[in-house]
Image: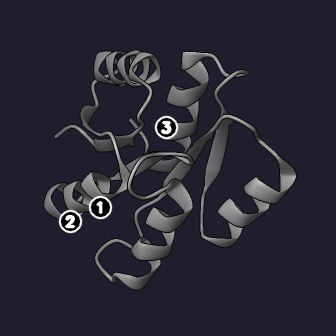
Amino acid sequence: MAKKILLLEDEEIMLDLLQRKLAKEGYDVSVARDGEEGLEKMREAKPDIVLLDVIMPKKGGFEVMEEMLKDKDLMNIPVIIISNSGQPVELDRAKKLGAKDWLIKTEFDPQEVIDKVIKQIGK
């Protein structure tokens, strides 16, 4: 059975790129365009991993991670942060909230996403 990835991202270009790349690799990808929708989908779909944008409508990535930590069904889902800035203070906060890894939008290539996902949950 394909591993499930939940992609929380509000930028359509990034969403489309990552969704296509991950699906092509054989993952079952679902998407959410804001933090509230993302939390709902996590509870429904129980993804194997979450790729999480930091700045989103309704609830940002850090707020989503704080909610995940309060929910025993969600707290152990690995999170890879997708960030525009990569500021040390932002990455430090993400790590404290349990992020397993991160990607800087302006610097990564799509294969890097695949490599980081495989490192966390396998093929």
Q: Position of residue 86 (x, y in %)?
A: 77, 41
Instruction: Report if the CB atoms under discs 2 and 1 are less than 8 Å apart.
Output: yes
Res 118 label: 3
Q: Which residue is mark 2?
A: 43
**Would residue 102 be found to the left or right of residue 34 on screen?**
right
Q: Nearer the viewer, residue 111 or 88?
A: 88
Q: Nearer the viewer, residue 53 or 115?
A: 53
Residue 90, image quadrant: bottom right
Residue 42, image quadrant: bottom left
Res 58 label: none
Residue at position x 70%, y 21% in the image: 106
Residue at position x 55%, y 42% in the image: 119
Q: Amino acid at mark 1?
A: Leu
Q: Amino acid at mark 3?
A: Ile
* Quarter of the figure that contains the N terminus: top left
Q: Which residue is mark 1?
A: 39
Which marked residue is nearer to the observer: mark 2 or mark 1? Answer: 1
Q: Earlier in the sequence, mark 3 or mark 1?
A: 1
Measured along the vertical axis of the image, is residue 56 above or below residue 40?
above
